[in-house]
Amino acid sequence: MPSNIDQALLNIALNLSSNCSHEQQYQTIIDTIEKVFPCDACCLFIFDEDGFLTPVAVKGLSPSVLGRRYFPKAHPRLNAIIQSHQPVRFDADCSLPDPFDGTLLTEDQCIDVHDCMGFSLYVEGQLIGVLTMDALSVGAFEHIDPVAIETFAALTAATLRNISQLRALKAQNQKQKNVTQTLIQQARSQHGEIIGLSQQIKQLRSNIATVAQSDYAVLITGETGTGKELVAHSVHAQSHRSDKPMIYVNCAALPEGLAESELFGHVKGAFTGANCHRTGKFELADGGTIFLDEVGELPLILQAKLLRVIQQGELQRVGSDQHLVVNVRIIAATNRQLEKEVEDGTFRADLFHRLNVFPIHVPPLRTRDGDIPVLAGYLLEKVRQQFNTPNLHVHPKVLAHFEFFPWYGNVRELEHTLTRAALYAIQQGSSTIMLNHFDASLTLSDVKNTSHHLPATSQPMRELIEDYQKDLIEHALNKTNRVWAKAAEFLQMDRGNLYRMGRKLGINR
C-alpha cells in the first residue's frame, strides 16, 4: 500500500466531524479512495429506503452516472456486494454484467471496465451504502491489504451514518407538521428538482437562496422549457411560507370574460352562471404564494386590477363592494421581453416594476457548460423505470454531440429528444443510445448552425431559401411551445400565411 495511507485515513476521520456539505464529504471519501487504491474509477452509493442505490460521488466515471438510481436485483454485481459483509472482487473474466460498462472514462473515450471490487457499508447490521472500485488493469486488486479496505469501509460507513442521522432528525421534525403541510410538500415534490453542476446553475441556486426568505416579488425570465416553474417552486419551498400553499395560475389560459373571477373570485349572482360564491386564486393563496405563469399574456384591463392587489393587498370579488385583505407573495414568470412590452405599451410599466423587484433569469441549456450529461442521466431514469431497462445509457459520442446542439426548446426539448431515441433503442434491443437513434434534424443541426445555409457546392437558390424558411419556422415553433399563433407573432407575420407556408414546406401542425 502507498506510504500515505495513514494520512488518507486521517483525512477521512477528520471528514466525520467537518462542517462541509454532504456533497463535499462524499467527494472527499471518493478522492481519498482514488489516491490510495490502484483504481481508475470509483463510486460511492447510498442505500435509500426504497431499496435503490443512488450514486452521490464518482471519480473516473461519466457524470451521467450521478443522474441514475440502481436497483440491486437488476445489477447482479451490486446485489452480490450488498449480500456480503466482506469485500467482493470480480475478475476480468467475470460473466456478470458490470453496471458501469460504457461509463468508465479514459482521456478521450469511454470503455468497459476490466477489474472490479466493491464492499458494502453496514452500521449495526443495517446497509447504508456501497463503495465500488474499477480498474483497467487485470488483477489490479489481487494484493490489496484487506485490513486497509475494512478500515476505509468502517470510516466511510461512519460518515454516511452521521449524514443519515442528521437527515433523519430533519425528517422527524418534518413529520411534526400537520396534514395540510404534508399534502403541500407531497404536491411540491411532484415538480422535480433543478438538475445541473454548471456555474450558471450554481448561480441560479444562489439567487433563489438569496431571495427565498424575503417577501419580495420575484420575476422569473427565460426561454421556453428552461424550468421557470421549477425555480418558482424552489423559491417557495425555501421561503418561510413553505408550509402554506403556492397557487399556480397560467395567465395565458385564463378564460376570456372569466379571468377576473378566476383571480379574485365572485359572489352569487354577479353574472349569468354565477350560482354560488367562488373563492379566487388570490384568496386561496392568502398567507402563501401565488405563481403567475406567463404573466406577459395578461390583458391590460386585468393588469390594472392586479396592480391594486399588489400595491394595497386588497381585492374585490366580482359583484361585491366588500374589500378583502390578503397577504400573498408574488412570483411571476414569462418568456417575453417585458421591457420591450412596456415600450410598446402592451404591458404596464408600473406593474412591471412591481413584479421585477428581484429578477431571476433561468439560463438556456446551450449556455450551461457540462450540465447535459447529468441531465441526460436524470431524464433517462424515467424511461429506465417505465420500461424496466436498468442498463440503458447514452453513448459518449452522443453526449459530445449534444454539446453542439442549440436546444431551442431547452431541457424540455432534451427530455423529449432523449425519450424518442430511447424508445427506438429499446425497440431495436440496444442498451446504448447511439446517434442513429435520433432523427435527422438532430444529427445535422450543428452542420446547419456552422454553415448558415451557405452551400459548399452549386445548388438552386430556391431550395436553399426554402430550407432556411423551414428552419426559421421550426425555430419559432420550438421557441413558442409549438403554438402557431405565437410563432407567427415571433416572426412578425400573419398566422394564416405562416400556416400555409409551413404546410407547403411539409411542417406538421
Image (cartoon, grey):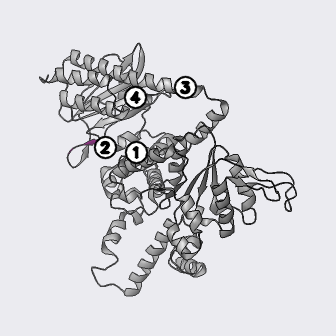
| C-alpha separation, residue under disc 3 versus residue under disc 1 | 32 Å
The residue that mark 4 highlights is 46
| Residues at marks 3 and 1 touching, judged by CB atoms closer than 8 Å | no
Query: Which-is-in-front pick, marks 4 and 2?
Result: 4
Give amino acid for label 3: Asn
Question: Could you say where residue 56 lies in the image, as x and y percent from the top left?
Answer: 37, 34
| Residues at marks 2 and 1 touching, judged by CB atoms closer than 8 Å | yes
Secondary structure beneath label 3: helix
Question: Could you say where residue 134 lies in the image, as x and y percent from the top left?
Answer: 25, 32
Q: Main secondary structure of the magenta part?
A: loop
The residue that mark 2 highlights is 62
| C-alpha separation, residue under disc 2 versus residue under disc 3 | 36 Å
| C-alpha separation, residue under disc 1 versus residue under disc 4 | 17 Å
| C-alpha separation, residue under disc 2 versus residue under disc 1 | 10 Å
Label whose residue precedes the other's in the sequence (2 or 3): 2
On-image quarter of the N terminus: top left
In the rendering, which numbered label is found on residue 173? Answer: 3
Label whose residue precedes the other's in the sequence (1 or 4): 4
Secondary structure beneath label 2: loop
| C-alpha separation, residue under disc 3 versus residue under disc 4 | 22 Å
Query: Where is 202 relative to 19, above or below?
Result: below
